[in-house]
Amino acid sequence: MSDNIPGADVGLIGLAVMGRNLALNIADHGFKIAVFNRTTSVMREFVVENPDTPGQLIGCATLNELIGALRKPRVIIILVKAGAAVETVVDQLLAAGLERDDIVVDAGNSNWNDTIRREKQYADRLKFFGSGVSGGELGARFGPSLMPGGDPESWKHLAPIWEAVAAKVDPATGRPIPGAAPGKPVRGGIPCTAYLGPNGAGHYVKMVHNGIEYVDMQLISEAYDLLRRLTGLSPGELAAIFLQWNRTELDSYLIEITAAVLAQRDPARPRKFLVDGILDVAGQKGTGQWTAASALSMGIPANSIAEAVFARGMSALKEERVSAARKLKAPPAAKKTGRTGIEAIRHALYCSKICAYAQGFQLMRQACRQYNWNLDFGTIAGIWRGGCIIRARFLQKITEAYQRDANLVNLLLDPYFRKQIRAGQESWRRVVMLAAQQGIAVPAFMSALAYYDAYRSAVLPANLIQAQRDYFGAHTYERTDAPRGKFFHIDWPDPNRPQREV
Ligand code: 6PG
């Protein structure tokens, strides 16, 4: 199928949903793209089904054909399942004749440690580059958010393609520019992509994006649960509330799709809402866990991100929960609050969301130290304004916060966010109290509030922990009246030995 004339701008391996949509997006922007899929019939059908793309699609039945179709240095995007498959494909490409200056871009949801390792592993044979891609199927097709990381020289070759195919935001408002259609991509605007740093930086930022995505989704589900249980409104009525919320500072893709999800009737039982027919067991593919594990390993308090992952774990214990529900006593049933609580829940959601993002950015700050990266947080917030799953009006505010102060220690300290939390915190606390009183599990709301209260505490009870550690293990402690870094220990009395009265 290949015309075998070297000259394609880019190659793409892996024509599953994300791969085929990204390939069409690239072709829409006039690039000549050579495509390969392990199952050749999938590639053939794909090329036949899409005859009129502005840029040419060149179907390649073998990797040798793919390599032969590309101009040098070759750029090949691989969109295969994260894990061992990535190395298998790269090794096959090397065996098929890929050269040292050629660039292989792993655009899957790979673990950043794998990307760091692979860059080193292949360093003298090719240029291995990692790029996060967010936005699901439609994002890939009409404008994703792209988070590239690798060597800066390779980026020079990738930038024209990445900047063309990424989602675009309006320079004046920071809002996504809508309207891309097959063959008619959006032109102009600020692309939702930027070079983020060397080796695993792109995949790390994508992973944190997903960690935040997990909390965003968990917070919205908790808000939905509270609304439902406190007001007694139906999913259809709640859809209208989420639509209203989408006209406030909560305006975001996830709130928008929540409204659509809640309004959806069940095709199998048209009088019912589909959400009520969906089993309450959440799946996960691992990026949320990686984010929480990275936070744990670096000692960074990303507690709401971790809670969101644990909440999915708790949901998976369906049978245990059903059995425990019969045995573990709930508090006495309380009266519904009616519509009066709706606005308070909205405030609670917004304040919690601010804390979740503060945690994600704090985590990336620490990752800079750990991996010697120089991530630009204003840029990261900027490229999340469009295309990705967490795109939201609020990301313009984060972009502005880091433009005001590139070295902002924590998002909570930015004047805009301080003001927002000041305005919402009374409602936030009331909502969390109400949930506790009524026995409604809101782990993300509660952990976000705990994060806020701990972060604003000049004094925490960790002094007691230090004393206990010194007591049982002579682990030593620092004193409030001595310089930091000077450690003390005392011989603690044995509780089993009778003490002399003082
Ligand atoms: C995106 C998403 C995507 C992710 C899905 C599913 O940015 O487009 O983050 O990369 O794979 O959201 O993730 P889970 O299966 O772990 O929920």
Image (cartoon, rainbow, N blue to C red):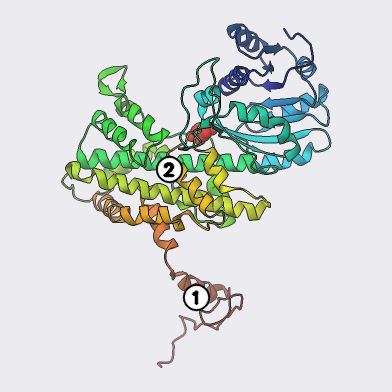
Q: Residue at x 44, y 87 (%)?
A: 498
Label 1 lies in ligand 1 vicinity (Cβ under 8 Å): no
Task: Work out whether mark 1 precedes mark 2 in sequence or the reverse, and give the earlier one.
Answer: 2
Instruction: Confirm whether residue 385 shows in the render.
Output: yes
According to the image, label 1 marks what residue?
A: 467
Q: Position of residue 25 (x, y in %)?
A: 58, 20
Q: Secondary structure at mark 2?
A: helix
Q: Residue 334 shows which numbered tag?
A: none
Q: Secondary structure at mark 1?
A: helix
Looking at this view, is 276 or 137 the one in front?
A: 137
- Residue 21's quadrant in the figure? top right
Q: Amino acid at mark 1?
A: Ala
In the figure, 456 relative to 90: above or below? Answer: below
Looking at this view, is 331 or 86 the one in front?
A: 86
Compute the Cα span from label 1 to label 2.
42 Å
According to the image, label 2 marks what residue?
A: 394
Q: Position of residue 464 (x, y in %)?
A: 46, 73
In the figure, 402 relative to 75: above or below? Answer: below
Q: Amino acid at mark 2?
A: Phe
Q: Position of residue 357 (x, y in %)?
A: 47, 48
Left or right: 241 in relation to 354: left
